[in-house]
């Protein structure tokens, strides 16, 4: 049986794992106590560094806050609130930011990497703080808090993103308030999470003053995205997604579909981050790791369709962008989300990124997306370009 690559432990990883363990124990006790979504369980000063040791002139807090699972049960989630140290005393916008795939191990959480300058999207987040905006970054359910990360589970992610904003507004040290204008932003998994937050806003967190959502590279249809990656460079993401769905819906019984090789990969992936997990499963096919394909089963198809976007209209304008040659998330899936929202009379500004593959799309699309949000914060109209479809 082939063995996945072994990730050698380092002193930093050991420290991060210890911190995650402490956070998990505290969050577990808080979850049992119950509370309203967005309520802060704990807030501890931390630091935000895009690169190791790089100063940012910001203040930051690691927060554990209450949220809601995909099934509607209370849970706790961790995240980070970052505020520029710029002397500003008046109101400032807040971005609730959803990161792309980081992995399944607790040490992969964005909040674990911010103090060390190892969180991949921190440089994109710094572009937002340099505008004078506060940024709240969720770790998502099951990263640094109890359980397994519910990777790609739309409702769980959307709840975590909205409740991260609620927690930031309730954090006295951040200097924000209930009238703070809010923007939602994310790419890849973060695009899915941010788009779900947009669809859930009017029913789950209508008190948030959301001015707009900017998301890119959105895996709006998980079944089509899985087919696209089967046997390709993103094959490991399929198995990670299966783990995430099974964590949210244990009745799916993922283990009963796996062969010995599949079980070995799952055990490995649950403790490692995305780069290692992707490399471990390059070009694997679903048939290589299963005794039968769960994606062909009605219960799996039903659950995966629960995470399909485009069935509910966001109650605010949306900016969508997608690389034309994205090798991980089908361009057609992004275009379909645009069409679905346009059909529901959402003001959608759609941007195709020519020659943009997945990572390049994240970089190329970040500044235009932030510029679009700045226009929303300034109160400018958002006509959209649905008519050009």
Image (cartoon, rainbow, N blue to C red):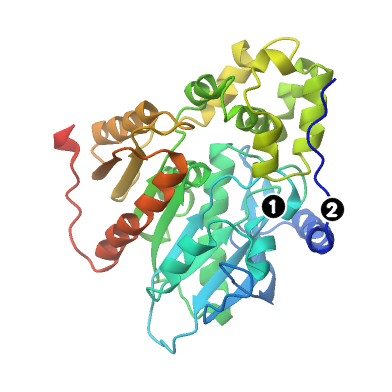
Q: Secondary structure at mark 1?
A: helix
Is residue 198 visible to the viewer in this orientation of the structure?
A: no
2 or 1: mark nearer the eye: 2
Badge 2: residue crowd in 10 Å (few <14, some 14–19, many ≥20): few
Circle nearer the N terminus (2, 1)? 2
Residue 208: give x, y in percent of width and height. 42, 61
Can you identify the residue that label 2 sits on? 9
Residue at 69% over, 61% down: 112
In the displayed orientation, state which residue is furthest to the left: 387
Label of residue 85 in the image: none
Foreground of the two, 247 or 269 = 269
Q: Above or below — where is 93 with respect to 306? A: below
Can you identify the residue that label 1 sits on? 108
Residue at 75% over, 16% down: 257
Residue 10: give x, y in percent of width and height. 83, 58
Q: CA distance from mark 2 to mark 1?
A: 14 Å
Q: Above or below — where is 10 with respect to 101? A: below
Q: Above or below — where is 38 with respect to 213? A: below
Count of marks overlaid on the render: 2
Q: Secondary structure at mark 2?
A: loop
Foreground of the two, 316 or 216 = 216
């Amino acid at each position: 049986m082939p063995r996945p690559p072994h990730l050698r432990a380092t002193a930093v990883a050991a420290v991060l794992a210890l911190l995650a363990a402490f956070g998990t124990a505290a969050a577990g006790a808080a979850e049992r106590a119950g509370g309203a979504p967005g309520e802060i369980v704990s807030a501890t000063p931390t630091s935000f560094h895009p690169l190791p040791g790089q100063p940012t002139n910001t203040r930051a807090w690691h927060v554990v806050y209450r949220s809601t699972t995909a099934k509607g049960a209370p849970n706790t989630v961790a995240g980070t609130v970052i505020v520029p140290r710029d002397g500003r005393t008046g109101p400032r916008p807040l971005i609730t930011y959803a990161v792309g795939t980081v992995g399944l191990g607790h040490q992969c959480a964005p909040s674990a990497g911010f103090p060390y300058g190892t969180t991949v999207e921190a440089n994109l987040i710094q572009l937002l703080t340099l505008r004078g905006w506060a940024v709240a970054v969720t770790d998502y359910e099951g990263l640094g808090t109890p359980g397994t990360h519910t990777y790609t589970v739309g409702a769980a992610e959307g709840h975590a993103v909205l409740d991260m904003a609620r927690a930031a507004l309730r954090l006295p040290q951040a200097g924000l308030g209930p009238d703070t204008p809010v923007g939602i932003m994310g790419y890849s998994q973060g695009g899915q999470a941010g788009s779900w937050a947009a669809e859930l806003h009017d029913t789950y967190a209508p008190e948030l003053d959301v001015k707009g959502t900017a998301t890119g590279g959105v895996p709006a249809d998980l079944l089509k995205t899985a087919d696209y990656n089967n046997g390709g460079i993103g094959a490991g993401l399929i198995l990670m997604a299966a783990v995430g769905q099974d964590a949210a819906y244990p009745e799916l019984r993922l283990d009963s579909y796996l062969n010995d090789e599949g079980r070995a990969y799952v055990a490995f992936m649950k403790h490692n981050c995305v780069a290692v997990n992707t490399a471990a499963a390059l070009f694997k096919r679903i048939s290589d790791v299963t005794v039968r394909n769960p994606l062909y089963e009605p219960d799996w198809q039903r659950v995966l369709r629960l995470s399909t976007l485009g069935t509910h209209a966001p109650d605010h304008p949306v900016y969508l962008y997608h690389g034309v040659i994205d090798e991980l998330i089908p361009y057609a899936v992004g275009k379909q989300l645009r069409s679905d929202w346009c059909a529901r009379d959402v003001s959608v500004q759609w941007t195709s990124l020519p020659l943009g593959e997945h990572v390049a799309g994240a970089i190329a699309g970040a500044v235009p997306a932030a510029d679009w949000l700045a226009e929303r914060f300034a109160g400018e109209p958002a006509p959209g370009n649905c008519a050009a479809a």
